[in-house]
Amino acid sequence: MDTTRSLRLTATVIVAFAALPLSGCLAAQIPSEPQTNVEPSAAPEPTEPSSDLPATLSFADGALLPESAYIEWGDSLMTDDGWEIAGADDGNGNWSYATTDGTCTAQFWQGFTSDVQTTPGDDSASSDAILATLLQTDAASVTPHATDGAFSYQTGGNADVEQRQITGEQDGRVWIMAARAFTATGAGVTLIVDCAGGDAQAVFAEVVDKNAIMAY
């Protein structure tokens, strides 16, 4: 990947995530004001397709990815009658959808992680570092509250991409934030599902099932 095109998690993403209600001691670690000086940059562009890809993308399997591999979200919600575009692709790796009943949103990000304090060869710890960047805290504050989860890989309906996630709840509003770093390629993806009603876990599972992580 072209490391000269350093990705920064954009101010739009940070503001959106920082505004979410948090509970417990993690909330006390997060600054009340979001960062405003974060420079945007474009999401990664595909390179030549690679045939040397691992069959699954566990945290350990991430080390088997070729450096040139391109990672992106598959996007099926654009043709799903239950969802509508809430925020079009901004050219910086961010876009979002809302359920047609207005109860939930799903925000996606994909891009480089060169401005995140990742740990080469440790996709789990580096995924926590992405969460920490979004929450404007440090990974040590995030890790005790994050759990292992999964995204789909190449096609929906599987749990072949390990990720790290955090859930927050306040006044009936529930959000689930998940991230995966791919340190071998310097890339990462995030997803947040935020619901003001209904079953957030079920909506998150639906989004994951319908939008697989693609590797080329």
Image (cartoon, grey):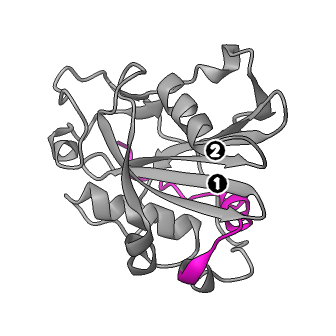
| 33 is higher (above) or lower (below) than 82 | below
Where residue 155 appears, as percent x and y from the top left, is 39, 19
| 130 is higher (above) or lower (below) than 194 | below
Residue that numbered label 2 is attached to: 200
Task: Say which residue appears at 40% left-offset and 64% top-offset.
Answer: 128
Magenta residues, as a range? Answer: 1-25
| Mark 2 or 1, nearer chain start | 1
Where residue 39 appears, as percent x and y from the top left, is 64, 62
Give the secondary structure at mark 2. helix
| 194 is higher (above) or lower (below) than 51 | below
Q: Name which residue type carries label 2.
A: Ala
Task: Say which residue appears at 75% left-offset and 80% top-offset.
Answer: 33
Q: Quadrant of the C terminus?
A: top left
Location of residue 160 (image quadrant): top left
Q: Is disc 2 in contact with disc 1, using a CB cutoff of under 8 Å?
A: yes
Q: Quadrant of the N terminus?
A: top left
**Residue 9 versus residue 154: which sits nearer the camera?**
154
Prevailing SS of the magenta stretch: loop
**Image label count:** 2
